[in-house]
Image (cartoon, rainbow, N blue to C red):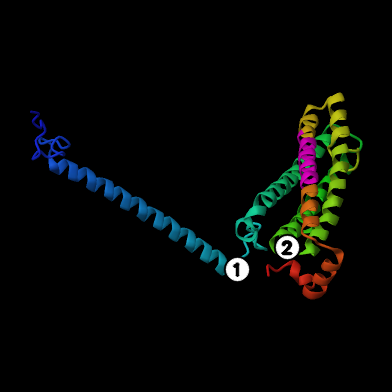
Amino acid sequence: MNYPTENPFASTHSLDTNPFEDPTDAQSTTNATRLEEIRQRELDLERREQELAQKQEHIRRHGRNNWPPFFPLIFHSIQDEIPQASQPLITRLYQLWLVLAGTLVVNMVACICILASGSSNGGSDLGSSIGYMIFITPLSFLLWYRPIYNGYMKEQALYYYLYFFFGGFHLLFSVYMIIGIPSTGSAGLIQTIQAFTKPSLPAAIVGTVATVGWVVQGVGLAYYYRQIWAHHKAAGHSVEKAKAELATHGAKAYFTRG
């Protein structure tokens, strides 16, 4: 006859606890953990309150406008205004615009180096490069980046046609700047090669950086130009639709988010 070997009255948890453990230490550890969690939550709440207060102060002073950061004139928020599926595209275009803005600055510095190297066309290059930096930077934002931003936000044909016109013109300008013809204000290929053969290392090095910048933003914009054209055709936009939108909303629609 087999008899059960287990004690039916024995507790299954009797070995899980240490009979010699000080219950006060365990309780203290638990309390310390809870206090740390509460402290972290309080810090998070304080941080959020500070962010909210900053946003409220910003809205009080500038309205919803948040761009450019140093002097807000317009509201720009890809996360808040662009459909989620299109946010990566608009983010890349914005980054390419930033590359363009940086390249214009580097291009001007390269022209300063070209002038310092004794180039007979250095004065013309420097003057033109300053003009490019002053005018191309804001105009590129307003004439091709902002239209496609609004286009994806509102999905209206008019903005796509504005982007295709001015964006196409900018692609031609990028090719022109990549070539780097002397006295045109571009520290592109020709100017950079001449600086290497002179040699003038400062002009050559900075010119190389400027040329790479022109190539990067030009090739990137050409790639997304095709992608946006495909989206535009798939969405069924037409010139007639763009005309109707212009007649209905007028030019003020360019500056509004509705």
Q: Is residue 219 magenta?
A: yes
Question: Dot 2 corresponds to which residue?
Answer: 155
Residue 138: assigned label: none
The secondary structure type at the circle numbered 1 is loop
Residue positioned most to the front = 1
Q: Is residue 222 visible?
A: yes
Of residues 247 and 55, the one nearer the viewer is 247
| Sequence order check, earlier mark of 2 and 1 | 1
Residue 41: % across, % down: 36, 54
Tell me what residue is drawn at x 51 percent, y 61 percent: 54
Residue 228, compared with residue 158, is above or below; it is: above
Q: Is residue 229 magenta?
A: no
Residue 75: % across, % down: 65, 62
Question: Dot 1 corresponds to which residue?
Answer: 63
Of residues 62 and 77, the one nearer the viewer is 77
Q: Is residue 69 visible?
A: no
Disc nearest the viewer among 2 and 1: 2
For badge 2, the amino acid type reads Glu
Residues in magenta, as a range: 209-224
Q: Residues within 10 Å of mark 1 (few under 14, many from 20)?
A: some
Of residues 62 and 43, the one nearer the viewer is 43
The secondary structure type at the circle numbered 2 is loop
